[in-house]
Amino acid sequence: MDVMPQQDPESGRPPEPSPQDPYVMPAEGATAVPPPPPTLRTTLRRAAFGAVAAGVLLAGALVAVGDGEGDGPKEPGPVERAEAATTAGSPASLSDLTALIGDRQKWVESHPRDAPSLATLGTAYVEWARRSADTAYYARAEETLKRSLEARAGERGNGEAWVGLAALANARHDFLAAKRWGETVKRQQPKAWSVYPVLIDAYTGLGDQKAATAATEKFGELRKGVPALARTAELYRGQGWREDALATAREAADRATQPAEKAEALHRLGELAWERGEPEEAVAQFDAALRTDAGQHASLAGRARALVALERTDEALAAYQSALEKLPRPEYALELGELYESLGLDGDARTQYTALREMVAGAKRAGVDESLLLARFEADHGDPDEAVELLRGQWREQHRSAAVADALGWALHRAGKSDEGLEYAQRAADTGVRNASYAYHLGMIQRELEDYGPARRNLEQAVRTNPAFSPLAAPLARQALEALGEPPPGGPGDMQPPPPPAPEPKPEPKREAEREPESGAGRKTKPEAPAASSKSPAPAPAASQEAAAGSAAPAEGGASKSP
């Protein structure tokens, strides 16, 4: 018979484990699990045998026994749908994911040494925590995956538990640990497609674009279809290839069949439209995602951003509040707080900032590192020096993505260290990503350093890319552009022709008495010292040079690089 979940699948929350559940533990962080061995001697034949055995056991747990009524195939239930989505590398709906968790919990109560089922349950916990922002499930995921490895070691074919630990490490922003787990599986089973998504996330978090690109290409070779298209679209997006990202994302949306998969593809199209500065299109895509799958809660926040750009403020506030209720992520609290601040509602803004700090503290207790988000908040609304320290710690841990580089550059600028901040802000821009905030930060740092031409160019790029990229920063970008004014007429200052040389004074003709007498025919007079060539410009007085340099400084500061 079918093993059904222990609660209404539409309740939106997995069942709570019983008090005797051995898989609940305090949060320790992904790196608390002993690292995988540096080398693996297990043969691929043993790994393949383990994978087949796991599939047989899992299929036996999930496939329902027919009741003898009717000859047609049984309609798949929520557990089967969730398992099918996972096997295809696609997201399951929250209700189906809830059913899968309930099914696995019930199964492992009577089969505590079933390593594949424990790996499935642990990985499902990770996915639930990620998509519900309920970080308490990360501790359950960690303990369940450890139990799976105790029942069967990774070297004996339990690579899926290692993949689950890599996914957990990524969710906790421990990208080095995720990389170690993922590469361990890749060495053992290089053709196991399931390891490549976690490797892509790990490499992206570490800022290793080359490795992320190679992993995305390999994933596309091993796993065709919508999952590969989705990953490829994200790769193009991160490299600033907008047209390619849009075309690939549209193909993924067109080919998606399951509601959760379709909704995620539509959400991606909404994000791309928002980043292009097309809020109406973004709202349409986010609305379509929510109609397709009401559990696509991230689209509520995306919709709120686009509504702000359309000056539909009341609707935006309601959308943000709904997003925070259903998906309490600290970044949404920061965005809502900044919207309140832009409206002059400082009390409401402080409430959201307090909520943000509480969410970050709760995430830390669950082993989640939210240093990047907290530093972004501190740089603009708190202590910039603290933001610098947080981000330097991230950099030391090799978290060198474009997001970390941009945040560190901006925090250094806000802390009065614009010279140092310029290096990191430029590094973020050099990745190619088309992000209006990155261009704004770089432009403001260059303006502070009196590098006016590049500053103007980057600020123009920010407002051109997305005129409403932030309710607080976008108006500041426009004000800074107005203060810089238009580029000087006639081209860059350092390309102007030099001023004409001062005319040489003509020597006065000698009086007749001063001429030397000739001693004989053909005798020449004594040559005079050669005069300065009339073709060589005379040096201008020092005071005039300083005055000219001072008056031309703003133009030279970047006009040569102005568009």
Image (cartoon, rainbow, N blue to C red):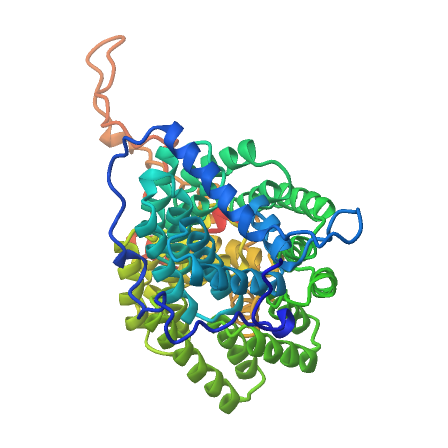
Residue pictured at 33% horizontal, 33% vertical: 509
- Residue at the extreme bottom: 347
Q: Nearer the viewer, residue 524 or 359?
A: 359
Q: Nearer the viewer, residue 110 or 431?
A: 110
* Whether residue 496 is visible: no
Observer-nearest of 197 and 271:
197
Furthest-top residue in view? 521
Q: How many marks?
A: 0
Residue beneath the point at 23% across and 26% down: 528
Q: Residue at x 55, y 46 (%)?
A: 59
- Side of 192 where 372 appears, left or right: left
Image x and y of residue 360, in percent: 39, 74
Q: Residue at x 50, y 57 (%)?
A: 439
**With 68 as the anchor, is 92 left or right in this view?**
left
| Quarter where residue 158 is shown | top left
Q: Is residue 113 visible?
A: yes
Q: Is residue 306 above or below residue 178?
A: below
Q: What is the x, y in percent for residue 74?
A: 73, 51
- Specify the farthest residue to the left: 519
